[in-house]
Image (cartoon, rainbow, N blue to C red):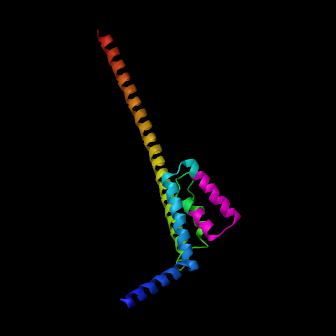
Amino acid sequence: MQHRCLIAAALFAFAGCASFDPRSFGVVMADGIVGEAVQLRRAGSAAEQKAALARADEAMRREATPANRLRLASLLVMLPDPLRDPQRAAELVEPLAEAGDPAYGRFAALIAVQAQEQARLARELARGARDLERERVERDKREEALRQQVEALRDIERGILEREDKMRRREK
């Protein structure tokens, strides 16, 4: 029983020491950054989101720490479209993105991947919009050509009817 208590105390002490590890502090910071961004995305109004983005941008301009880079990048990736800028987010986290770093590096790599995916989706969306526009223009051209053909057929029909009327009048 005493051994179990000693082992439990030792494990607790090791866990406590690990929580004071400077690298694990980054994990806690990264968790807080994500929590703030998600909460702002869910409950924040557009004005609050814009203000939070401006504050994060200002903090980044004052001091380009990894935490400030990640905070701004996470907002740029998570906020709705008018405020979203995945290209800039990727540029911000590129120097930090190391998969071996347990805190900021992995989080930065995650943000970089998410930013790349958003950029890819934006390109596909733009390409789809261009394709739809091109199809609309082609459809409009076909419709106009068909309208002209229908109008030409009506003119031909009117001409035939007029000639028939003239021929009937002559016969009478």
Q: Residue at x 61, y 52 (%)?
A: 51
Question: Any magenta on residue 40?
Answer: no
Quadrant of the rendered image containing residue 142: top left
Q: Residue at x 55, y 48 (%)?
A: 46
Residue 162 x %, y % = 36, 18
Which residue in the rendered view is the most extreme toward the left? 172
Residue 96 x %, y % = 59, 73
Is residue 119 among what the camera can see? no
Look at the picture and state if 140 lies above or below 100. Answer: above
Magenta part of the chain: 49-73
Look at the picture and state if 51 lies above or below 70. Answer: above
Q: Residue at x 50, y 55 (%)?
A: 41
Which residue in the rendered view is the most extreme toward the top? 172
Residue 91 x %, y % = 61, 66
Side of 48 where 146 appears, left or right? left
> Principal SS element in the magenta part?
helix
Residue 92 x %, y % = 61, 66
Instruction: In this rendered view, identify the residue nearer to me: 55 or 115.
Output: 55
Is residue 121 among what the camera can see? yes
